[in-house]
Amino acid sequence: MKLLLFAAGLLCLMGVARGSDDEQLVREVVKSFVTDYNNGDFKNAPSYTTDDWVHINPGGGLTRGRDEVLEEVRAIHKTMLKGVSITIDSMTVHFVTRDVALVNAIHKSDSYVTPEDGVKHENERQMKTYVVVKHNGKWLLALDQNTIISNP
């Protein structure tokens, strides 16, 4: 009986450790996205995104497919977001299944101006939701969605 309890406890610990490793790998995917965002070129995106990556921008625009998303985000980083960086204030990871993680991260953004209305965004905080999936043993970004946190 003691051996059975020991084995069960050991299996639980192994599961926690595996989950902890997976959580760190999921966090690294988000950090890779942030690094590419800050560089503005997203040159490393193929290494951490799925082919069918979906991007939902703060205005509600929906873009599907890595090539299309990269075209959109690279264009915006050459204009309105040129030189703009974000930092992670907080991040939580929730595993929906063994192979699907939801990440909520609050980012702080450098100042920028939206060209369509001339509004200057300063000290802005954004809630970004990421869906990260395990594909062929590797964690990849499948969807990101960005919402500006309104200041009362």
Image: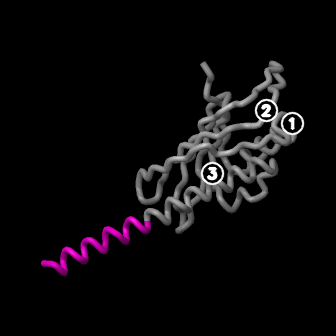
Disc 2 + disc 1, Cβ < 8 Å: no
Identify the residue shown where x is 55% and y is 47%.
91
Q: Is residue 133 above or below residue 145?
A: below
Residue at the extreme bottom of the image, as rendered: 3
Q: Is residue 36 above or below residue 59?
A: below
Q: Position of residue 74 (x, y in %)?
A: 81, 45
Identify the residue shown where x is 64% and y is 30%.
148
The amino acid pointed to by label 1 is Thr
Residue at the extreme left of the image, as rendered: 1
> Dot 3, how many residues are within 10 Å of its Cα: few (below 14), some (14-19), or many (20+)?
some
Image side of residue 63 versus residue 94, left or right: right
The amino acid pointed to by label 2 is Ser
Q: Find the magenta span and give its range.
A: 1-18
Identify the residue shown where x is 82% and y is 27%.
113
Which mark sits nearer the N-terminus, 1 or 3?
Answer: 3
The amino acid pointed to by label 3 is Asp
> Dot 2, how many residues are within 10 Å of its Cα: few (below 14), some (14-19), or many (20+)?
some
- Residue highlighted by disc 3: 52
Secondary element at tag 2 = loop
Secondary element at tag 3 = strand
Q: Give the number of the disc on residue 11.
A: none
Which mark sits nearer the N-terminus, 2 or 3?
Answer: 3
Q: Position of residue 61 (x, y in %)?
A: 67, 32
Does the stretch in magenta take in 150?
Answer: no
Q: Position of residue 111 (x, y in %)?
A: 79, 32
Q: CA distance from mark 1 to mark 3?
A: 25 Å
Q: Give the number of the disc on residue 111.
A: 2
